[in-house]
Image: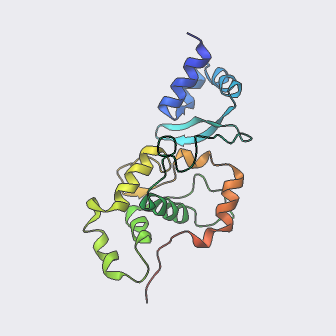
Amino acid sequence: MNEDAYLLARARAVRVVPLASAGALGELSVLRRAAEDVQRRLVEVEGAGGPGVMVRWALDVEPVSGVVGDPLTHREAAPSQLLTLGAAVRLCWPDPEQPLYPGGAVAEEDVLGACAPPGDGLLREGMALIGQTSAYRSALRVLRAWGYLAADAGDGMVRLGPVVAAWNERDVEELRRGYDLLPCRVEEE
């Protein structure tokens, strides 16, 4: 089997390749070459086991996965997932003038609270009680599984994940322009 193809497939399957193991085995340069050969790039991220790299599309490549709206080729995120991701980005990134990734850590309850409709104090206080059945708590699990949020460390905190590290600067700049539109917890008086 072609070693380049094998390393690339393995890297995509494990999502984050720890730098310690890749460097120790001398695989990093081979993986970088394999990625470049198929219009991909390696992005340095902070994985669960320390620093690592992730395979993402090259900056000048816009992949097309099918016709938008075609359920066979394009799956859209649920509104609860988009709202939860927006709240996590806003809360983990308190200063849009700073780099987006890695951002900070915020309590899960703060992210869930930011997803509640403004002015609905009863829903906000009840959010913790119905947490396990909440669409937003479910969205946290899905976003972690997809890599948009870091894996659950068991400390009740939310952190931005490795997929966010791979967002291109054009997309991050768009987030900066719309920063005030991202959901955040509004303190009621």
Q: Position of residue 62 (x, y in %)?
A: 68, 42
* Identity of the residue furthest to the top in this view: 1
Please say if 36 is above or below 128: above
Residue drawn at (48%, 47%), measured in percent from left and top? 75
Name the residue nearer the viewer: 89 or 50: 89
Q: Residue furthest left?
A: 129
Residue 101, horizontal then vertical, whole percent: 60, 52
50 to 95, vertically: above or below? above
Instruction: Pick whichever, 43 or 12, lies toward us.
Output: 12
Residue at the location (46% across, 44% down)? 146
Which percent across, then down, holds residue 55?
60, 34
Q: Can residue 25 be spotted in the picture?
A: no
On the picture, is 150 further left or further right than 182? left
Residue drawn 65% across and 37% down?
Answer: 57
- Residue at 58% in and 45% down: 67
- Along the horizontal axis of the image, is 35 left or right of 46? right
Eyeballing the image, is 67 above or below 156?
Answer: above
| Position of the C terminus by quadrant | bottom left
Tell me: residue 33, above or below residue 97.
above
Side of 56 where 120 appears, left or right = left
- Residue 85 in the image: x percent, y percent? 49, 59
Colour scheme of the rendered structure: rainbow
Q: Is residue 128 in view from this perspective?
A: yes
Residue 29 quadrant = top right
